[in-house]
Amino acid sequence: MRDAVNIQAVEQLGIDWMGMIFWPKSSRYVADVPTYQPKQIRRVGVFVDASLEYIRQHVSDYQLDLIQLHGHETPAFAEALKPLSVIKAFNIADVKDLNQTKAYEGIVDYFLFDTKGKVVGGNGEKFDWSVLSSYHGETPFLLSGGIGPDDVEAVNSFHHSKCIGIDLNSRFEQAPALKDITKLSNFLKQLHHE
C-alpha cells in the first residue's frame, strides 16, 4: 500500500494489518512515506534480503509495527531484529517445505505460508493448503498465496489451530499496490457472514 487515498479507504474496512513493500524490484515498491498513515492498523514492512540498517531506517521512517522477511534471511538475522516483531515468510509446495520453519521456532513471532512461485510473493496462485495439516510448530501463521474474491468458502473451511489470519494482496488489486475497495469489502463481508 502506498496511495494515501487507497490506504484510507482500506483502513475503513476494519482490517488488522497493512503491508508496505520495501523491495525495489517489486511493482508494489514503496519509495516514499505516504501522505496518510493508518492510525488503527498495525503496519507491516515487507523486506527481501535487505540489510539490518535498511530495515531499521524504514521502521523509523514509516513507523512500522512488524517486519516481514520474504527472502533468504537466516534465523540469526531475524534474531538481530529484536525487539521488533518479525514475520518470516516461507514458500510452500509440499510437506518437506515445512521443515524450513524449525530453525526459526522461538525466534520469530509469526510465519507466513506463501505459494512457491517464479517471483518473490504476489504470484496470485494458491498452494495446496492441506499440506499445512503437517505443520505442528508452535509459531502462529498467516495463510497467503493467491487468495482471491472467490475463495470465501475455501478460507472459511480451512482450520488450523495456529492460523491467525489471511493475507490478501494481488487478486484484490486494480493495479500494483492499489486495492479494489469493492472486491475487498465484499470479500470481508462474506467472510464474516455479514
Image (cartoon, grey):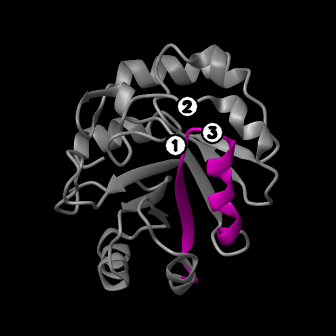
Question: What's the residue type where badge 2 is placed?
Answer: Phe
Image position of 135 with respect to 182: above or below: below
Q: Cα distance, mark 3 to mark 2?
A: 8 Å
Residue at mark 1: 114
Q: Is there CB contact under 8 Å for labels 2 and 1?
A: yes
Q: Identify the mark at residue 127; answer none if there is no mark.
A: 2
Position of residue 171 measured from the top left corner of the image (x, y, whole percent): 38, 26
Q: Which span of residues is magenta-colored? A: 82-104
Image position of 94 with respect to 48: above or below: above
Question: What's the residue type where badge 1 is placed?
Answer: Asp
156 to the left or right of 74: right
Which secondary structure lies at badge 2?
A: loop
Residue at mark 3: 94
Position of residue 89 measured from the top left corner of the image (x, y, whole percent): 52, 55
Disc 3 or 1, which lies upstream in sequence? 3
Position of residue 46 measured from the top left corner of the image (x, y, whole percent): 39, 59
Q: Cα distance, mark 2 to mark 1?
A: 7 Å
